[in-house]
Image (cartoon, rainbow, N blue to C red):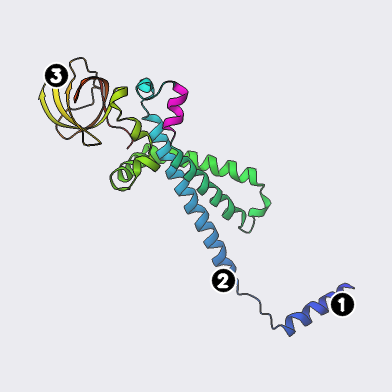
Amino acid sequence: MTKKELSQNVLETIKNKKILPKPKWTFLLRNYVVWSVGIVSLLIGSLAMSVIFYMFVNNDWNEYHYISDSFAQFILLTLPYFWIVLLVVFVLIADFYVRNTNRGYRYRLPVVVVISVAASVFLGGIFYQVGMGQAIDEVLGNKAPFYEKFINTRVRFLNDPERGVLSGKIIEIISETELNFKDIECGDWKVFYSRGFMPPMLEMHSGIGVNLMGRVINENTFEAEIIKPVGPG
């Protein structure tokens, strides 16, 4: 079939099936939608990255032996799996939509993935610096159901009296060496902290949330060797 015959057949097909050309605005709208979804996905991935940064920085690295039997186990127990999965999902969504733009097909998938991850890390670092990671974690910690089971499992390992860790809030400061404490499971404790270490920025007062690390003396009595501001969760 010659080019002329092929062109004639195409024209006849268009005429017989009454095919009309799509308006230009439909292609423009599609591009806007594709780019918008890609950018939103990248931003969500970056926000997830900011939470990962926040949880990494505030992960009680020096006190890992209170939570686990080894440093490797501590890392596995406290990795922010939910946020890592969320980051991967939205990076892949961003990649898919970018590759479906007018010129996106020109770029190889590994190149697009690397650029998307790099952009998520860069933007995530900026969001972390302005406090977005902490804000997201605190809002979800207060509002999200099953937060400690699915989103921030680290919380569960910070309230284990047998290992010498309690997480909760100060109910009453009795003296410079004694206070009443309620853990996150609503257990009441009398805490002695004469040898406790407290960061200079920690202002002790009723109602403040803190993490205690030390040892159980007897039932509902705890000796705190370390007192820290409550971290992620």
Q: Which mark is first along the chain, 2 or 3? A: 2
Magenta stretch: residue 72 in it?
A: yes
- Residue nearer the viewer, 188 or 202: 188
Residue 211, located in which quarter of the rendered image?
top left
Report the amino acid beneath label 3: Thr
Instruction: State the CA–CA distance, disc 2 to disc 1.
Output: 32 Å
Contact flag, marks 3 and 2 (Cβ < 8 Å): no
- Image quarter (top left, top right, bottom left or bottom right) of the C terminus: top left
Q: Look at the picture and state if 109 lies above or below 31.
A: above
| Mark 1 surroundings within 10 Å by alpha-carbon count, few (fewer than 14), some (14 through 19), many (20 or more) | few
Of helix, strand and loop, which one carries label 3?
loop
Instruction: State the CA–CA distance, disc 3 to disc 2.
Output: 72 Å
Residue receiving disc 2:
25
Instruction: State the CA–CA distance, disc 3 to disc 1.
Output: 97 Å
- Left or right position of 132 against 27: left
**Extreme left residue here?**
174
**Extreme front residue here?**
219
Q: Which mark is residue 5?
A: 1
**Extreme top residue here?**
195
Residue span colored magenta? 71-79
